[in-house]
Image (cartoon, helix red, strand yellow):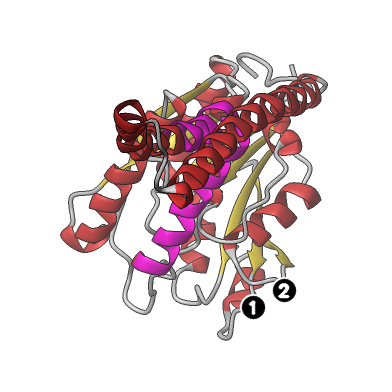
Amino acid sequence: MASPRIAVLLPCYNEEATVAKVIAGFRKALPGAAIYVYDNNSRDRTVEKARKAGAIVGSERMQGKGHVVRRMFADIEADVYVMADGDLTYDPKAAPAMVRRLLNDRLDMVVGTRQHEEKQAYRGGHVIGNRLFTGLLARLFGRSFSDIFSGYRVFSRRFVKSFPVLSEGFEIETEMSVHALELRMPVDEVVTAYGSRPEGSESKLSTFRDGWRILRTILTLYRVERPVLFYGAIGALLLVAALILAIPLVITYLDTGLVPRFPTAILVTGMVIVAVLCGFAGLILDTVTRGRREMRRLAYLALPGPERGA
């Protein structure tokens, strides 16, 4: 049986200080793999050092990790894809075990769950945010991963070529997680070491700006993938509010036979109508969502899965 083609994907932005070491680490860990560095408008010598280290270099001009991942997934042909950041925080030595897990268990995605021992490796705000968003994802979608923001992942070809990539920035990992959960793909997690950034490398993640974008992405995906629950919840809140406002009106009417507050009565009527419309909108959109999910599932199944023990 032929060995699978393995591609290592490294999205990079101003990683001059680390890119050569990352390439060397993955070349040693996965000797037969092709290593791709996609530059995202770096202002330093990232491209020069990546070429000198022997990587295949591409570029994406639209700024943002999501744009880079979309370009890499479209351009690169392989059987197994290993994705990691180019800042030397992920351990290349963990890659062979993640690839074996994907192939032996015929999975579509293996997530490298980060385990850090150095305080500088993972800021406290990021730890809290990761836990909050991971819990939110589990509550909204019923399932989740231990580390939804990990950028260290191994994919099958059918995951990569069936994944539309709609995100622009660091919310891409959240979109990947939801895509796998919604299509009921076989996935797993492997604990991997997560180190601090070397001197000269800076984090591109903004706690508040990117945190807000991630939250917005989760809510958008929930609206798209769970329309009955999303619009049903809005309708239920409107209905409860309308009933609370209507109680004094009903009591007054039963006592006097009059409805003295017409604006409130009109408001209650409007809120009930909108609540009912929200319910029907959720039901209609659920039918559309099911059709889209079936089409995505068929596109996913049209591609061959990883060969066991390859």
Along the line of sight, which residue is nearer the eye, 82 or 272? Answer: 272
163 w.r.t. 13: above or below: above
Distance between the alpha carbons at the discs numbered 1 and 2: 6 Å
- Magenta segment, which residues? 208-236
Other residues around mark 2 within 10 Å, as few (<14) / some (14–19) / many (≥20): few
Q: Residue at x 69, y 30 (%)?
A: 285
Quadrant assignment, res 307: top right
In contact (CB < 8 Å): disc 1 and disc 2: yes
Label 1, on which residue?
A: 41
Please provide percent x and percent y for residue 18: 45, 69
The residue shown at (17%, 59%) is 119
Q: Which residue is mark 2?
A: 61
Whole-percent x, y for residue 279 in the image: 59, 28
Question: Where is residue 211 drawn, in percent x and y?
Answer: 39, 59
On the question of residue 206 being in view, the answer is: no
Amino acid at circle 2? Arg
Query: Left or right: 236 with respect to 186?
Result: left
Q: Main secondary structure of the magenta part?
A: helix
